[in-house]
Image: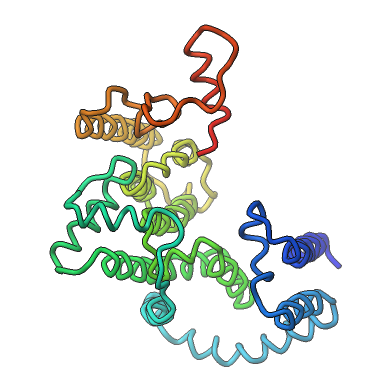
Amino acid sequence: MRKLEKVIFSTCLFLVLIHAIASFFPKERLWGLNLLHYMPFFFRWFLIGLGLLILIPKVNRFVSDSLAKLLAPIENGLKKINTYYKYAVISIVSFLPFWIFRVKTRLLGDGNLRVAEILDGWKFSPTEPLDFYLHAQLSNFLKLDPSTTYAILSCLGGVLFIFFILLLSDLMGEEGQKKLLVFSILATLGANQLFFGYVESYTLMYVTLGGLVLFSLYYLKGRCGFLWPALLFLLSASLHLSAIFLLPSVLYLGVAKKSQEAEAKSKTFSWVNIINMALILLCLSGGFLVLRNLTPQESDLGSFLIFPLGANDFEPPAFDLPFGDPHLDHFGFVLFKQD
């Protein structure tokens, strides 16, 4: 067994065992790991046994070879079709399972809150400005209730995300089986539940992050300019401010060494990327100032945008340092705040 295969085997074995063990301890802190506990006892053990069985090298090799033989004619037939047309059709078809199996309740997240805010006529939310505005405007334009509007955009976002990860799989996988492996991993991420009609503010941002990863790789391979990942980052941050955590990686991308093939194709002076990065920072700074003006009732810029640093009349600091300097209290708040 090669080194990479050993790493994959160990990781998969750990995942199977941790889910199996967690299924017997359905505690709140195991949310996301104890899913099997809520399945019928027989089906739970069937899945655990199947997961362990497929990790046996001979069984794994048999399954792999069988899938390769099964998929070979399909792959050969699909090679004759234009890549973008092929992936576009697959993506559009994915709308059906997203819509058919969409969630019927809003028991998690801020779903009920977002629906109530739109029904009350709100058009702005400081933490997800563009996302909330789009949902509110579309709900009013189509004369649909907010839940249906969120569900439609959620499923459509899933279609676009599938298209992005198909292109990512094509880019990262050298052959059919590797492409299928990459796609299977990306298509079964837990966050993909957002595309099943979920009333949540992260859905569209999550889609743009998929596009950001794709176009960042395109840029490193010389297939697009730095402007595209930069614009996708700004779009992500406009949809939801939490996307700002990717700012360091985007700035690094602007100065990262590209592949030799990309360097040979590139005719853009490196200073152009530096200018683009400066524009990104300028746009973000301008966005913060606009949001501050749109929330005049808040005295501190951080109240919504950088919550732990801002004033909040409803929730005192969770941890106070035994010093009189308020800046140290803020520092402790940043370190220990769990929201």
Q: Position of residue 192 (x, y in %)?
A: 49, 65
User: On the picture, is 136 further left or further right than 324?
Assistant: left
> Coloured how?
rainbow
User: On the picture, is 45 further left or further right than 129?
Assistant: right
- Taking 267 as reference, is 136 above or below it? below
Q: Position of residue 237 (x, y in %)?
A: 35, 44
Based on the displayed image, in which of its 4 quarters is residue 312 positioned? Answer: top left
Farthest residue toward the top? 324
Residue appearing at x 19%, y 52% in the figure: 120
- Taking 291 as reference, is 178 above or below it? below
Based on the displayed image, in which of its 4 quarters is residue 57 positioned? Answer: bottom right
User: On the picture, is 87 further left or further right than 14?
Assistant: left
- Taking 300 as reference, is 36 above or below it? below
Q: Position of residue 83 (x, y in %)?
A: 42, 77
Closest to the observer, 265 or 144: 144
Q: Is residue 223 visible?
A: no
The image quadrant where one finds the N terminus is bottom right
Residue appearing at x 46%, y 26% in the figure: 316
Closest to the observer, 122 or 57: 122
Total tally of numbered discs in the picture: 0
Based on the displayed image, in which of its 4 quarters is residue 59 positioned? Answer: bottom right
Residue appearing at x 40%, y 81% in the figure: 100
Q: Position of residue 306 (x, y in %)?
A: 40, 31
Residue appearing at x 53%, y 14% in the figure: 328
